[in-house]
Image (spheres, rainbow, N blue to C red):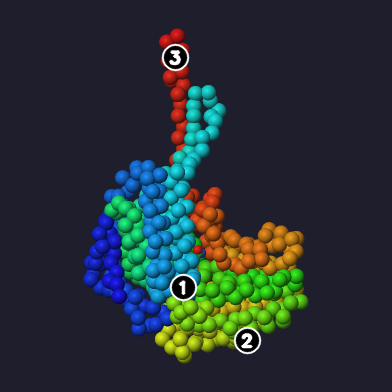
Protein backbone atom coordinates (compact mmCIF):
# COMPACT_ATOMS: atom_id res chain seq x y z
CA UNK A 1 0.00 0.00 0.00
CA UNK A 2 1.35 3.40 -0.98
CA UNK A 3 1.24 6.67 0.94
CA UNK A 4 0.24 9.19 -1.68
CA UNK A 5 1.34 12.80 -1.28
CA UNK A 6 0.86 16.10 -3.06
CA UNK A 7 3.59 17.26 -5.42
CA UNK A 8 4.20 20.97 -4.99
CA UNK A 9 7.15 23.06 -6.16
CA UNK A 10 9.26 20.00 -6.89
CA UNK A 11 8.63 18.24 -3.56
CA UNK A 12 6.39 15.39 -2.40
CA UNK A 13 4.56 16.87 0.58
CA UNK A 14 1.86 16.08 3.13
CA UNK A 15 -1.30 18.21 3.16
CA UNK A 16 -1.55 21.03 5.69
CA UNK A 17 -4.42 19.34 7.53
CA UNK A 18 -2.55 16.06 7.92
CA UNK A 19 -5.80 14.26 7.07
CA UNK A 20 -5.96 11.34 4.66
CA UNK A 21 -8.46 9.32 2.64
CA UNK A 22 -8.24 5.86 1.12
CA UNK A 23 -8.27 4.70 -2.46
CA UNK A 24 -9.65 1.18 -2.67
CA UNK A 25 -9.83 -1.58 -5.24
CA UNK A 26 -13.46 -1.71 -6.45
CA UNK A 27 -13.08 -5.44 -7.20
CA UNK A 28 -11.90 -6.16 -3.62
CA UNK A 29 -13.26 -3.59 -1.24
CA UNK A 30 -10.88 -4.63 1.53
CA UNK A 31 -7.80 -3.89 -0.52
CA UNK A 32 -6.50 -0.37 0.05
CA UNK A 33 -4.51 0.78 -2.99
CA UNK A 34 -3.25 3.97 -1.38
CA UNK A 35 -3.61 6.21 1.64
CA UNK A 36 -3.83 9.68 0.21
CA UNK A 37 -3.34 13.15 1.67
CA UNK A 38 -6.55 15.14 1.87
CA UNK A 39 -5.82 18.70 0.81
CA UNK A 40 -7.55 21.99 1.48
CA UNK A 41 -7.27 25.60 0.43
CA UNK A 42 -3.77 26.22 1.77
CA UNK A 43 -2.38 23.35 -0.28
CA UNK A 44 -4.04 24.72 -3.40
CA UNK A 45 -2.60 28.18 -2.61
CA UNK A 46 0.91 26.73 -2.46
CA UNK A 47 0.48 24.71 -5.64
CA UNK A 48 -0.80 27.72 -7.58
CA UNK A 49 2.01 29.90 -6.25
CA UNK A 50 4.59 27.32 -7.37
CA UNK A 51 3.00 27.16 -10.84
CA UNK A 52 3.05 30.96 -11.09
CA UNK A 53 6.71 31.14 -10.11
CA UNK A 54 7.72 28.43 -12.58
CA UNK A 55 5.79 30.01 -15.44
CA UNK A 56 8.33 32.67 -16.42
CA UNK A 57 11.19 30.29 -17.11
CA UNK A 58 9.00 27.50 -18.54
CA UNK A 59 7.30 29.78 -21.08
CA UNK A 60 10.76 30.90 -22.23
CA UNK A 61 12.08 27.34 -22.50
CA UNK A 62 12.11 26.64 -26.26
CA UNK A 63 9.19 24.43 -27.28
CA UNK A 64 11.49 21.73 -28.79
CA UNK A 65 13.29 21.51 -25.40
CA UNK A 66 9.94 21.18 -23.62
CA UNK A 67 9.14 18.46 -26.15
CA UNK A 68 12.27 16.51 -25.22
CA UNK A 69 11.01 16.15 -21.64
CA UNK A 70 7.63 14.95 -22.88
CA UNK A 71 9.35 12.47 -25.20
CA UNK A 72 11.34 11.12 -22.27
CA UNK A 73 8.12 10.81 -20.26
CA UNK A 74 6.56 8.79 -23.09
CA UNK A 75 9.62 6.50 -23.05
CA UNK A 76 9.26 5.94 -19.30
CA UNK A 77 5.52 5.31 -19.66
CA UNK A 78 6.39 2.62 -22.26
CA UNK A 79 8.97 1.10 -19.93
CA UNK A 80 6.45 0.96 -17.07
CA UNK A 81 3.38 0.12 -19.15
CA UNK A 82 2.74 -3.30 -17.63
CA UNK A 83 2.93 -2.18 -13.99
CA UNK A 84 0.87 0.96 -14.69
CA UNK A 85 -1.78 -1.11 -16.47
CA UNK A 86 -2.01 -3.43 -13.49
CA UNK A 87 -2.28 -0.48 -11.13
CA UNK A 88 -5.16 0.91 -13.21
CA UNK A 89 -6.98 -2.39 -12.92
CA UNK A 90 -6.49 -2.43 -9.16
CA UNK A 91 -7.51 1.15 -8.58
CA UNK A 92 -10.20 1.71 -11.21
CA UNK A 93 -11.38 -1.83 -11.95
CA UNK A 94 -11.14 -1.98 -15.74
CA UNK A 95 -9.84 -5.28 -17.17
CA UNK A 96 -6.08 -5.44 -17.67
CA UNK A 97 -6.16 -5.19 -21.49
CA UNK A 98 -8.09 -1.93 -21.11
CA UNK A 99 -5.74 -0.70 -18.38
CA UNK A 100 -2.83 -1.28 -20.75
CA UNK A 101 -4.78 0.48 -23.51
CA UNK A 102 -5.27 3.48 -21.25
CA UNK A 103 -1.52 3.70 -20.59
CA UNK A 104 -0.89 3.33 -24.33
CA UNK A 105 -3.04 6.41 -24.97
CA UNK A 106 -0.84 8.37 -22.61
CA UNK A 107 2.27 7.07 -24.40
CA UNK A 108 0.81 8.06 -27.78
CA UNK A 109 -0.12 11.48 -26.45
CA UNK A 110 3.36 11.98 -25.00
CA UNK A 111 5.10 11.26 -28.31
CA UNK A 112 2.54 13.26 -30.28
CA UNK A 113 2.76 16.36 -28.10
CA UNK A 114 6.56 16.07 -27.92
CA UNK A 115 6.53 16.37 -31.73
CA UNK A 116 4.25 19.41 -31.51
CA UNK A 117 7.16 21.16 -29.79
CA UNK A 118 8.83 21.32 -33.20
CA UNK A 119 5.63 22.22 -35.07
CA UNK A 120 4.40 24.95 -32.78
CA UNK A 121 3.66 27.17 -35.73
CA UNK A 122 1.58 30.21 -36.58
CA UNK A 123 1.17 32.01 -39.89
CA UNK A 124 2.91 34.68 -41.85
CA UNK A 125 0.71 36.48 -44.37
CA UNK A 126 1.33 39.38 -46.77
CA UNK A 127 0.45 42.89 -45.64
CA UNK A 128 -1.51 45.45 -47.65
CA UNK A 129 1.48 47.81 -47.32
CA UNK A 130 4.94 47.46 -48.89
CA UNK A 131 6.98 48.04 -45.72
CA UNK A 132 5.09 45.98 -43.21
CA UNK A 133 5.09 42.31 -42.26
CA UNK A 134 2.75 40.37 -40.05
CA UNK A 135 2.54 37.03 -38.33
CA UNK A 136 0.63 35.10 -35.70
CA UNK A 137 2.33 33.23 -32.86
CA UNK A 138 1.04 30.64 -30.44
CA UNK A 139 1.75 31.69 -26.85
CA UNK A 140 0.89 30.01 -23.56
CA UNK A 141 -2.14 31.01 -21.51
CA UNK A 142 -0.48 30.91 -18.04
CA UNK A 143 -1.38 28.67 -15.10
CA UNK A 144 -3.89 25.92 -15.93
CA UNK A 145 -6.05 24.14 -13.37
CA UNK A 146 -6.62 20.59 -14.66
CA UNK A 147 -9.51 18.60 -13.14
CA UNK A 148 -9.89 14.98 -14.21
CA UNK A 149 -12.28 12.01 -13.71
CA UNK A 150 -11.51 8.43 -12.71
CA UNK A 151 -12.54 6.40 -15.77
CA UNK A 152 -9.30 6.95 -17.76
CA UNK A 153 -7.05 7.61 -14.79
CA UNK A 154 -3.76 7.99 -16.68
CA UNK A 155 -4.92 8.79 -20.22
CA UNK A 156 -7.07 11.79 -19.31
CA UNK A 157 -4.44 13.47 -17.10
CA UNK A 158 -2.01 12.91 -20.00
CA UNK A 159 -4.50 14.41 -22.50
CA UNK A 160 -4.42 17.59 -20.44
CA UNK A 161 -0.92 17.74 -18.96
CA UNK A 162 1.08 17.03 -22.16
CA UNK A 163 -0.57 19.67 -24.36
CA UNK A 164 -0.69 22.22 -21.52
CA UNK A 165 3.05 21.81 -20.94
CA UNK A 166 4.14 21.73 -24.57
CA UNK A 167 2.38 25.06 -25.08
CA UNK A 168 4.44 26.59 -22.25
CA UNK A 169 1.80 26.67 -19.52
CA UNK A 170 2.39 25.50 -15.99
CA UNK A 171 -0.33 23.53 -14.21
CA UNK A 172 -2.00 22.28 -11.06
CA UNK A 173 -3.56 18.83 -11.52
CA UNK A 174 -6.54 17.82 -9.33
CA UNK A 175 -7.32 14.19 -10.17
CA UNK A 176 -10.39 12.22 -9.10
CA UNK A 177 -10.32 10.99 -5.51
CA UNK A 178 -11.24 7.53 -6.84
CA UNK A 179 -7.95 7.18 -8.74
CA UNK A 180 -5.30 9.30 -6.99
CA UNK A 181 -2.57 6.64 -7.12
CA UNK A 182 -2.67 6.40 -10.94
CA UNK A 183 -2.42 10.18 -11.26
CA UNK A 184 0.48 10.23 -8.81
CA UNK A 185 2.42 7.59 -10.77
CA UNK A 186 1.88 9.68 -13.91
CA UNK A 187 3.32 12.78 -12.20
CA UNK A 188 6.26 10.72 -10.87
CA UNK A 189 7.09 9.81 -14.45
CA UNK A 190 7.20 13.45 -15.53
CA UNK A 191 9.47 14.20 -12.58
CA UNK A 192 11.78 11.34 -13.62
CA UNK A 193 11.76 12.73 -17.16
CA UNK A 194 13.30 15.94 -15.85
CA UNK A 195 10.40 18.38 -15.53
CA UNK A 196 11.63 21.48 -13.64
CA UNK A 197 10.10 22.18 -10.23
CA UNK A 198 6.80 24.00 -10.10
CA UNK A 199 5.88 23.33 -13.75
CA UNK A 200 3.42 20.60 -12.79
CA UNK A 201 1.89 20.41 -9.31
CA UNK A 202 -0.48 17.78 -7.95
CA UNK A 203 -3.11 18.30 -5.27
CA UNK A 204 -5.38 15.51 -3.98
CA UNK A 205 -8.72 16.05 -2.32
CA UNK A 206 -12.49 16.27 -2.67
CA UNK A 207 -13.79 17.95 -5.81
CA UNK A 208 -16.28 20.17 -4.01
CA UNK A 209 -13.50 21.72 -1.93
CA UNK A 210 -10.18 21.41 -3.71
CA UNK A 211 -11.49 21.42 -7.30
CA UNK A 212 -13.89 24.29 -6.79
CA UNK A 213 -11.32 26.41 -4.94
CA UNK A 214 -8.78 25.73 -7.71
CA UNK A 215 -11.30 26.78 -10.38
CA UNK A 216 -11.94 30.10 -8.66
CA UNK A 217 -8.37 30.78 -7.48
CA UNK A 218 -7.14 34.26 -8.46
CA UNK A 219 -3.73 32.89 -9.50
CA UNK A 220 -5.18 30.50 -12.09
CA UNK A 221 -5.61 31.67 -15.70
CA UNK A 222 -7.69 28.84 -17.19
CA UNK A 223 -9.43 25.60 -16.28
CA UNK A 224 -9.64 22.37 -18.24
CA UNK A 225 -12.24 19.99 -16.84
CA UNK A 226 -13.37 16.49 -17.78
CA UNK A 227 -16.19 14.90 -15.81
CA UNK A 228 -19.95 14.91 -15.43
CA UNK A 229 -22.29 17.53 -16.88
CA UNK A 230 -23.47 18.68 -13.46
CA UNK A 231 -19.95 19.42 -12.22
CA UNK A 232 -18.89 20.96 -15.53
CA UNK A 233 -21.92 23.24 -15.64
CA UNK A 234 -21.24 24.38 -12.09
CA UNK A 235 -17.62 25.16 -12.94
CA UNK A 236 -18.68 27.00 -16.11
CA UNK A 237 -20.86 29.19 -13.88
CA UNK A 238 -18.00 29.89 -11.46
CA UNK A 239 -15.52 30.67 -14.24
CA UNK A 240 -18.04 32.69 -16.27
CA UNK A 241 -18.65 34.99 -13.31
CA UNK A 242 -14.94 35.84 -13.05
CA UNK A 243 -14.24 35.90 -16.81
CA UNK A 244 -11.98 32.85 -16.66
CA UNK A 245 -11.47 30.61 -19.65
CA UNK A 246 -12.80 27.07 -19.07
CA UNK A 247 -12.99 24.08 -21.37
CA UNK A 248 -15.31 21.24 -20.42
CA UNK A 249 -15.55 17.65 -21.63
CA UNK A 250 -18.63 16.05 -20.11
CA UNK A 251 -21.01 13.11 -20.30
CA UNK A 252 -22.68 11.22 -23.13
CA UNK A 253 -25.74 9.19 -24.08
CA UNK A 254 -24.25 7.66 -27.17
CA UNK A 255 -26.11 5.49 -29.64
CA UNK A 256 -25.51 2.86 -32.30
CA UNK A 257 -27.95 2.64 -35.23
CA UNK A 258 -28.30 -0.88 -36.65
CA UNK A 259 -29.85 -0.81 -40.11
CA UNK A 260 -31.70 -3.72 -41.77
CA UNK A 261 -28.74 -4.29 -44.13
CA UNK A 262 -26.13 -4.32 -41.35
CA UNK A 263 -23.67 -7.13 -40.80
CA UNK A 264 -25.41 -8.21 -37.60
CA UNK A 265 -22.48 -10.13 -36.14
CA UNK A 266 -20.29 -7.07 -36.48
CA UNK A 267 -23.00 -4.87 -35.01
CA UNK A 268 -23.43 -7.22 -32.03
CA UNK A 269 -19.68 -7.10 -31.33
CA UNK A 270 -19.78 -3.29 -31.50
CA UNK A 271 -22.76 -3.18 -29.15
CA UNK A 272 -21.08 -5.56 -26.69
CA UNK A 273 -17.84 -3.61 -26.40
CA UNK A 274 -19.51 -0.23 -26.68
CA UNK A 275 -22.07 -1.10 -24.01
CA UNK A 276 -20.17 -3.29 -21.59
CA UNK A 277 -16.48 -2.49 -22.21
CA UNK A 278 -15.07 -0.56 -19.21
CA UNK A 279 -18.28 -1.78 -17.51
CA UNK A 280 -20.19 0.91 -19.44
CA UNK A 281 -18.13 3.61 -17.72
CA UNK A 282 -16.90 5.47 -20.78
CA UNK A 283 -18.09 8.90 -21.81
CA UNK A 284 -18.46 7.35 -25.28
CA UNK A 285 -20.21 4.13 -24.12
CA UNK A 286 -22.93 2.85 -26.49
CA UNK A 287 -25.85 2.94 -24.08
CA UNK A 288 -28.60 3.14 -26.70
CA UNK A 289 -29.06 0.77 -29.62
CA UNK A 290 -31.50 2.00 -32.24
CA UNK A 291 -32.36 -1.06 -34.30
CA UNK A 292 -34.32 -1.31 -37.54
CA UNK A 293 -37.71 -3.05 -37.19
CA UNK A 294 -36.82 -5.72 -39.78
CA UNK A 295 -33.80 -7.02 -37.80
CA UNK A 296 -34.94 -6.04 -34.30
CA UNK A 297 -35.85 -9.51 -32.97
CA UNK A 298 -32.90 -11.24 -34.54
CA UNK A 299 -30.48 -8.61 -33.25
CA UNK A 300 -31.88 -8.76 -29.72
CA UNK A 301 -31.53 -12.53 -29.60
CA UNK A 302 -27.93 -12.46 -30.77
CA UNK A 303 -27.05 -9.53 -28.51
CA UNK A 304 -28.62 -11.13 -25.43
CA UNK A 305 -26.91 -14.46 -26.09
CA UNK A 306 -23.51 -12.84 -26.56
CA UNK A 307 -23.87 -10.58 -23.50
CA UNK A 308 -24.95 -13.49 -21.29
CA UNK A 309 -21.55 -15.10 -21.93
CA UNK A 310 -19.60 -12.13 -20.52
CA UNK A 311 -17.73 -13.05 -17.34
CA UNK A 312 -17.63 -10.64 -14.44
CA UNK A 313 -14.73 -10.50 -12.04
CA UNK A 314 -11.44 -8.98 -11.04
CA UNK A 315 -9.90 -7.44 -14.16
CA UNK A 316 -6.50 -8.94 -13.33
CA UNK A 317 -7.89 -12.42 -13.96
CA UNK A 318 -7.47 -13.52 -17.58
CA UNK A 319 -10.98 -14.89 -17.96
CA UNK A 320 -12.69 -11.63 -16.89
CA UNK A 321 -14.49 -9.61 -19.56
CA UNK A 322 -16.25 -7.07 -17.34
CA UNK A 323 -14.87 -5.56 -14.14
CA UNK A 324 -16.61 -3.82 -11.23
CA UNK A 325 -18.14 -0.35 -11.20
CA UNK A 326 -16.06 2.31 -9.53
CA UNK A 327 -17.63 2.82 -6.09
CA UNK A 328 -20.61 2.34 -3.83
CA UNK A 329 -22.36 5.50 -4.88
CA UNK A 330 -22.19 4.53 -8.60
CA UNK A 331 -23.21 0.97 -7.71
CA UNK A 332 -26.35 2.24 -5.97
CA UNK A 333 -27.12 4.79 -8.67
CA UNK A 334 -26.96 2.16 -11.45
CA UNK A 335 -29.28 -0.20 -9.55
CA UNK A 336 -31.71 2.69 -9.01
CA UNK A 337 -31.76 3.26 -12.77
CA UNK A 338 -32.63 -0.41 -13.31
CA UNK A 339 -35.70 0.15 -11.12
CA UNK A 340 -36.54 3.33 -13.06
CA UNK A 341 -36.37 1.36 -16.33
CA UNK A 342 -38.73 -1.32 -15.00
CA UNK A 343 -41.20 1.28 -13.73
CA UNK A 344 -41.12 3.09 -17.06
CA UNK A 345 -42.29 -0.12 -18.74
CA UNK A 346 -39.10 -1.20 -20.51
CA UNK A 347 -38.60 -4.98 -20.67
CA UNK A 348 -35.56 -6.32 -18.83
CA UNK A 349 -34.12 -9.28 -20.78
CA UNK A 350 -30.73 -9.64 -19.09
CA UNK A 351 -29.05 -8.77 -15.80
CA UNK A 352 -30.43 -5.94 -13.71
CA UNK A 353 -28.90 -7.23 -10.49
CA UNK A 354 -25.80 -6.89 -8.41
CA UNK A 355 -23.48 -9.89 -8.63
CA UNK A 356 -22.18 -10.84 -5.21
CA UNK A 357 -21.05 -14.40 -5.52
CA UNK A 358 -17.87 -16.23 -6.53
CA UNK A 359 -15.36 -13.84 -8.13
CA UNK A 360 -17.65 -10.93 -7.41
CA UNK A 361 -18.21 -11.43 -3.69
CA UNK A 362 -15.90 -8.65 -2.55
CA UNK A 363 -16.57 -5.90 -5.05
CA UNK A 364 -19.06 -3.56 -6.70
CA UNK A 365 -20.28 -5.79 -9.50
CA UNK A 366 -23.41 -5.36 -11.60
CA UNK A 367 -24.49 -7.84 -14.25
CA UNK A 368 -24.52 -6.69 -17.88
CA UNK A 369 -28.07 -5.40 -18.23
CA UNK A 370 -30.26 -5.12 -21.33
CA UNK A 371 -33.61 -3.38 -21.60
CA UNK A 372 -35.67 -3.80 -24.78
CA UNK A 373 -38.89 -2.13 -25.94
CA UNK A 374 -37.45 1.12 -24.69
CA UNK A 375 -39.02 4.30 -25.98
CA UNK A 376 -36.70 7.20 -26.76
CA UNK A 377 -38.09 9.57 -24.14
CA UNK A 378 -37.70 7.18 -21.16
CA UNK A 379 -35.23 8.34 -18.53
CA UNK A 380 -33.05 5.27 -19.11
CA UNK A 381 -32.72 6.39 -22.74
CA UNK A 382 -32.08 10.04 -21.93
CA UNK A 383 -29.88 10.20 -18.83
CA UNK A 384 -26.28 9.10 -18.43
CA UNK A 385 -26.26 6.01 -16.16
CA UNK A 386 -22.53 5.30 -16.45
CA UNK A 387 -22.73 1.58 -15.88
CA UNK A 388 -23.38 -1.68 -17.79
CA UNK A 389 -26.96 -0.86 -18.79
CA UNK A 390 -28.00 -0.80 -22.46
CA UNK A 391 -31.39 0.28 -23.86
CA UNK A 392 -32.63 -1.12 -27.17
CA UNK A 393 -35.06 1.03 -29.16
CA UNK A 394 -36.90 -0.05 -32.30
CA UNK A 395 -36.99 2.19 -35.39
CA UNK A 396 -38.86 2.25 -38.71
CA UNK A 397 -36.21 3.82 -40.91
CA UNK A 398 -32.96 5.77 -41.04
CA UNK A 399 -34.56 9.21 -40.72
CA UNK A 400 -36.42 8.21 -37.55
CA UNK A 401 -33.28 6.55 -36.16
CA UNK A 402 -31.27 9.74 -36.62
CA UNK A 403 -34.03 11.79 -34.94
CA UNK A 404 -33.95 9.40 -31.97
CA UNK A 405 -30.17 9.56 -31.66
CA UNK A 406 -30.19 13.36 -31.78
CA UNK A 407 -33.01 13.77 -29.26
CA UNK A 408 -31.00 13.76 -26.03
CA UNK A 409 -29.24 16.63 -24.28
CA UNK A 410 -25.86 15.03 -25.07
CA UNK A 411 -23.85 14.94 -28.30
CA UNK A 412 -20.59 13.06 -27.90
CA UNK A 413 -20.43 9.94 -30.05
CA UNK A 414 -22.67 7.91 -32.38
CA UNK A 415 -22.35 5.02 -34.81
CA UNK A 416 -24.18 3.35 -37.67
CA UNK A 417 -23.92 -0.20 -38.96
CA UNK A 418 -25.00 -0.42 -42.60
CA UNK A 419 -23.71 -1.78 -45.93
CA UNK A 420 -25.29 1.09 -47.83
CA UNK A 421 -22.94 3.92 -48.70
CA UNK A 422 -25.86 6.36 -49.02
CA UNK A 423 -27.20 5.58 -45.54
CA UNK A 424 -23.74 6.05 -44.07
CA UNK A 425 -23.40 9.40 -45.88
CA UNK A 426 -26.73 10.65 -44.50
CA UNK A 427 -25.77 9.50 -40.98
CA UNK A 428 -22.38 11.18 -41.27
CA UNK A 429 -24.10 14.41 -42.29
CA UNK A 430 -27.03 14.45 -39.88
CA UNK A 431 -25.94 12.84 -36.61
CA UNK A 432 -25.47 15.64 -34.09
CA UNK A 433 -22.43 14.32 -32.22
CA UNK A 434 -18.79 15.33 -32.12
CA UNK A 435 -17.70 11.87 -33.31
CA UNK A 436 -19.44 9.53 -35.77
CA UNK A 437 -18.35 5.94 -36.43
CA UNK A 438 -19.32 3.94 -39.52
CA UNK A 439 -19.45 0.16 -39.01
CA UNK A 440 -17.58 0.52 -35.72
CA UNK A 441 -18.74 1.09 -32.17
CA UNK A 442 -19.01 4.49 -30.45
CA UNK A 443 -15.69 3.97 -28.68
CA UNK A 444 -12.05 3.93 -29.75
CA UNK A 445 -10.98 7.49 -30.59
CA UNK A 446 -7.39 7.97 -31.75
CA UNK A 447 -5.27 10.84 -30.49
CA UNK A 448 -4.21 12.30 -33.84
CA UNK A 449 -7.66 13.82 -34.41
CA UNK A 450 -9.52 16.30 -32.20
CA UNK A 451 -11.78 14.80 -29.52
CA UNK A 452 -14.91 16.36 -28.07
CA UNK A 453 -18.68 16.48 -28.02
CA UNK A 454 -21.37 19.12 -28.40
CA UNK A 455 -24.46 20.17 -26.36
CA UNK A 456 -24.22 18.82 -22.79
CA UNK A 457 -21.12 16.82 -23.76
CA UNK A 458 -19.02 19.98 -24.20
CA UNK A 459 -18.20 22.70 -26.68
CA UNK A 460 -16.55 20.35 -29.16
CA UNK A 461 -13.02 19.67 -30.31
CA UNK A 462 -10.84 20.67 -27.43
CA UNK A 463 -8.71 17.66 -26.68
CA UNK A 464 -6.15 15.52 -28.54
CA UNK A 465 -4.53 16.28 -31.86
CA UNK A 466 -5.28 17.44 -35.37
CA UNK A 467 -6.33 20.92 -36.40
CA UNK A 468 -8.43 22.65 -33.77
CA UNK A 469 -7.48 20.11 -31.11
CA UNK A 470 -5.56 20.55 -27.90
CA UNK A 471 -3.12 23.22 -29.09
CA UNK A 472 -6.05 25.60 -29.63
CA UNK A 473 -7.16 24.92 -26.06
CA UNK A 474 -3.83 25.33 -24.34
CA UNK A 475 -2.37 28.24 -26.32
CA UNK A 476 -3.66 31.57 -27.50
CA UNK A 477 -2.84 33.58 -30.56
CA UNK A 478 -0.68 36.67 -30.46
CA UNK A 479 -0.50 38.72 -33.64
CA UNK A 480 2.56 40.81 -34.53
CA UNK A 481 2.57 43.66 -37.08
CA UNK A 482 5.94 45.18 -37.94
CA UNK A 483 6.18 48.44 -39.85
CA UNK A 484 9.60 49.11 -41.36
CA UNK A 485 8.64 52.08 -43.55
CA UNK A 486 10.78 54.37 -41.32
CA UNK A 487 13.87 52.47 -42.45
CA UNK A 488 12.83 52.80 -46.13
CA UNK A 489 12.28 56.56 -45.74
CA UNK A 490 15.72 56.92 -44.14
CA UNK A 491 17.27 55.03 -47.05
CA UNK A 492 15.60 57.44 -49.48
CA UNK A 493 16.83 60.49 -47.51
CA UNK A 494 20.37 59.06 -47.39
CA UNK A 495 20.28 58.71 -51.19
P1 LIG B 1 -17.29 14.17 -11.65
O1 LIG B 1 -17.89 15.34 -12.35
O2 LIG B 1 -17.94 13.67 -10.44
O3 LIG B 1 -15.77 14.49 -11.22
C1 LIG B 1 -14.80 14.90 -12.17
C2 LIG B 1 -13.70 15.67 -11.44
O4 LIG B 1 -14.26 16.86 -10.91
C3 LIG B 1 -13.12 14.92 -10.24
O5 LIG B 1 -11.74 15.23 -10.12
C4 LIG B 1 -13.88 15.50 -9.06
O6 LIG B 1 -13.17 15.42 -7.84
C5 LIG B 1 -14.03 16.94 -9.51
N1 LIG B 1 -15.17 17.64 -8.90
C6 LIG B 1 -16.32 17.12 -8.41
N2 LIG B 1 -17.11 18.11 -7.95
C7 LIG B 1 -16.45 19.27 -8.16
C8 LIG B 1 -16.74 20.63 -7.91
N3 LIG B 1 -17.89 21.02 -7.34
N4 LIG B 1 -15.85 21.57 -8.27
C9 LIG B 1 -14.68 21.21 -8.88
N5 LIG B 1 -14.34 19.93 -9.14
C10 LIG B 1 -15.21 18.97 -8.77
O7 LIG B 1 -17.13 13.02 -12.76
P2 LIG B 1 -16.56 11.55 -12.54
O8 LIG B 1 -17.60 10.74 -11.84
O9 LIG B 1 -15.19 11.60 -12.00
O10 LIG B 1 -16.43 11.05 -14.06
C11 LIG B 1 -17.48 10.52 -14.79
C12 LIG B 1 -18.04 11.56 -15.74
O11 LIG B 1 -17.00 12.04 -16.58
C13 LIG B 1 -19.10 11.00 -16.68
O12 LIG B 1 -20.14 11.93 -16.79
C14 LIG B 1 -18.34 10.85 -18.00
O13 LIG B 1 -19.17 10.86 -19.14
C15 LIG B 1 -17.44 12.03 -17.95
N6 LIG B 1 -16.31 11.87 -18.84
C16 LIG B 1 -16.26 12.63 -19.96
C17 LIG B 1 -15.21 12.49 -20.86
C18 LIG B 1 -15.13 13.31 -22.11
O14 LIG B 1 -14.06 13.40 -22.68
N7 LIG B 1 -16.23 13.90 -22.57
C19 LIG B 1 -14.21 11.55 -20.60
C20 LIG B 1 -14.30 10.79 -19.43
C21 LIG B 1 -15.34 10.96 -18.55
Determine which quarter of the picture holds residue 381.
bottom right
Residue 220 visible? The answer is: no
> Label 3, on which residue?
491
**Residue for point 25% across, 67% down:** 15
Of 186 and 393, which appears nearest the observer?
A: 186
> Residue 257: x percent and y percent?
67, 70
Local packing at callout 1 (Cα closer than 10 Å; few below 14, some 14-19, many 20+) is many
Q: Depth-wise, is mark 1 or mark 2 nearer the camera?
A: 1
> Label 2, on which residue?
349
Q: Depth-wise, is mark 3 or mark 1 nearer the camera?
A: 1
**Residue for point 45% across, 35% down:** 480
- In the displayed structure, 472 sits above or below 430; it is above
Image quadrant occupied by the C terminus: top left
Residue 54 visible? The answer is: yes
Whether tag 1 and tag 2 are in contact, CB under 8 A, the answer is no
* Ligand 1 has an atom within 8 Å of the beta carbon of the residue at disc 3: no
Whether tag 3 and tag 1 are in contact, CB under 8 A, the answer is no
Classify mark 2: helix, strand or loop.
Answer: strand
> Label 1, on which residue?
96
Q: CA distance from mark 3 to mark 1?
A: 71 Å
Give the mark, 1 or 2, whose residue is nearer the N terminus: 1
Whether tag 2 and tag 3 are in contact, CB under 8 A, the answer is no
> Residue 490: x percent and y percent?
42, 15
- In the displayed structure, 88 sits above or below 301; it is above
Amino acid sequence: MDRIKNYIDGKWVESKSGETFRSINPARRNEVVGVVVRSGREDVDQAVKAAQQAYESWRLTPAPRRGEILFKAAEILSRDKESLGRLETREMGKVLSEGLGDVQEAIDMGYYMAGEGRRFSGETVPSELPAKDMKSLRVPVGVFGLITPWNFPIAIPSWKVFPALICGNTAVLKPSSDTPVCATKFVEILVEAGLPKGVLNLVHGPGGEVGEYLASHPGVDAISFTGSFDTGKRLEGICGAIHRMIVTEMGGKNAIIVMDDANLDLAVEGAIWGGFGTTGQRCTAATRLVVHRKVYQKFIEKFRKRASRLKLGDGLQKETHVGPVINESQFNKILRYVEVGKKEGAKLILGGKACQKGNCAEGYFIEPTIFVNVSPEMRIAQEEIFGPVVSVIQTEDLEEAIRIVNRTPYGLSSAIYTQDVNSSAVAERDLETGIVYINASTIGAEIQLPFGGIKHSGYGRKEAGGRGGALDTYSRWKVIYRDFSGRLQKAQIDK
